[in-house]
Amino acid sequence: MMLLALSGARADAPVPDSTAASGAAADSVRSSPADSASAGASANAPQARRPRRLLHDAGHAFVVFASDAGYVLSFPARLDAKGAVILAGTVAGEAVVYNNDEDLYTALTRNRGNSAYDRVRDLGKRLEPIGITQHTQPIYLGTLVVGYAFRLDRLQEISGELLESHLIAGTLRQLCIGLIGRKRPSQELGPRTFEPRHGRSFYSGHTSAGFEIATILSHHVDFVPFTVLAYATAATIPIQRIDARSHWASDCFLPAITGTLIARGIIHRFEERKQAQPSSSWMPEISPWIPASSGADGAIGIKLTRRF
């Protein structure tokens, strides 16, 4: 978790000019035509990058993660009309699925032997390891470190988002196990048997992880066909989990929604931090300029405006 800060705020953000009066200030540097070449060279010079501060970034991770977790888990306090409708629809949908758990299992498994169904189920089985955090977290940590070390911003950001969303969703799952403790279908006790701290059926961490990954990758790829494919692939995971009698259908319905919303909340937080970072740019433009040392009217010069 300490490495989350490495992606929460990119370390290579340009450092603002120390002589600036404010973040919105603009310094205008004017040159005659004879000076335009040197001005252009300055404009094209690479921006200085802030040196890596590993200990500082790692220490800041606790603040970043706690802030993001608080933001995601406190969503009821920020509900607007649209959010209230989504929440009400989710609760209603979960209630309908819960009341039909056994019928849904029977209807689903009736398709065993159908080649299309078997391929979907087998794909979900092959994707099962993505829901096991002991397997995935070392991978995400490794890619986060690689992105940080080599300044691969996109890799760094995706890895950080996956880590945060999985940690928050995993915490929610452990709370559900402790408070609800629903028994798995494979235990042959029916869908209404609960034993807090012992039952592990609700909710499906595999389903949540699949939809978190689909949400985060779709955001970064930003291509509709990929988004459709990503969510369709994620949907094979709950199908397999229900077929294998690891979960009831209602154990998977809610995590598919919460996994998506948690990932979207983390993406929103990362985007907020990126937009809040100071930036620096040179904007060249041609404009009339009268040098103080000459009386030429309307001489054409180059004006470079730097905003930071």
Image (tube, rainbow, N blue to C red):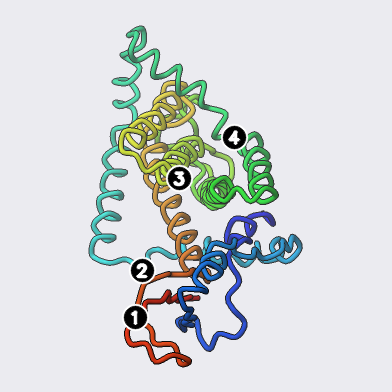
For badge 2, the amino acid type reads: Arg
Dot 2 alpha-carbon crowd within 10 angstroms: few under 14, some 14 to 19, many 20 or more: few
Instruction: Report the residue marked by disc 3.
Output: 216
For badge 4, the amino acid type reads: Ile
- Residue 278 picture location, percent across and down: 53, 71
Mark 1 element type: strand
Q: Which mark is residue 288?
A: 1
Give the CA distance from mark 4 to mark 3: 18 Å
Give the CA distance from mark 3 to mark 2: 22 Å
- Residue occupying image coordinates x 57% and y 68%: 42
> Which mark sits nearer the N-terminus, 4 or 2?
2
Instruction: Report the residue marked by disc 4.
Output: 132
For badge 1, the amino acid type reads: Pro
Give the CA distance from mark 1 to mark 3: 49 Å
> Which mark sits nearer the N-terminus, 4 or 3?
4
Dot 3 alpha-carbon crowd within 10 angstroms: few under 14, some 14 to 19, many 20 or more: many
Mark 3 element type: helix
Occupied quadrant, residue 303: bottom left
Instruction: Report the residue marked by disc 2.
Output: 78
Give the CA distance from mark 2 to mark 1: 51 Å
- Residue occupying image coordinates x 54% and y 39%: 199
